Amino acid sequence: MFADFAGLVSTGTGWERPLTEVVTTTAVVCAAYESARRGGTPVSVPEHRPAVTG
């Protein structure tokens, strides 16, 4: 999908690869942020949460 997007944007200006990297990086960062915000996927997160007592 990103390759198709880069192909659409490609005009021979040399921006194809940087743009693809920016889009990919943004997608990864957003996914990581969303999962962390929901208390999500990182396996180490639950062990480091303080225990709720009382």
Image: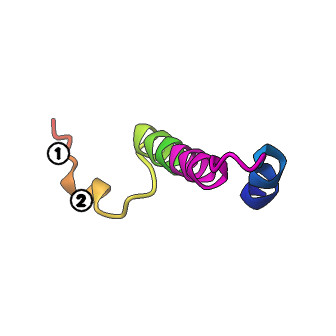
**Residue 54 in picture, x, y percent from top left:** 15, 35
Q: Residue at x 68, y 45 (%)?
A: 13
Circle 1 is placed at which residue position? 50
Mark 1 to mark 2: distance in Å?
A: 8 Å
Q: Amino acid at mark 2?
A: Glu
Could you say which disc has been placed on residue 30 in the image?
Answer: none
- Please give the range of residues in magenta: 11-27
Name the spot of residue 12 as percent of width and height, x first: 74, 50
Q: Mark 1 is on which residue type?
A: Pro
Residue at disc 1, secondary structure = loop
Q: Residue at x 38, y 59 (%)?
A: 42
Residue nearest the observer in this picture, 52 or 2: 2
**Splitting the image into 4 quarters, where does residue 45 fall?**
bottom left
Left or right placement of residue 29 versus residue 24 in this view? left
Question: Label 2 crowding class (10 Å Cα cut-off): few <14, some 14-19, many 20+?
Answer: few
Residue sitting nearer the eye, 22 or 38: 22
Outermost residue to the front: 12
Residue that carries the numbered disc 2 in the rendered image:
47
Q: Main secondary structure of the magenta part?
A: helix
What residue lies at 40% left-to-right and 44% top-to-bottom? 36
Label 2's element? helix
- Residue at point 56% right, 50% down? 18
Q: Is residue 38 above or below residue 7?
A: above
Residue 54 to residue 47: above or below:
above
User: How crowded is the residue under tag 1: few (<14 C-alpha within 10 Å), some, or many (20+)?
Assistant: few
Direction from residue 2 to residue 7 in the image, left or right: right
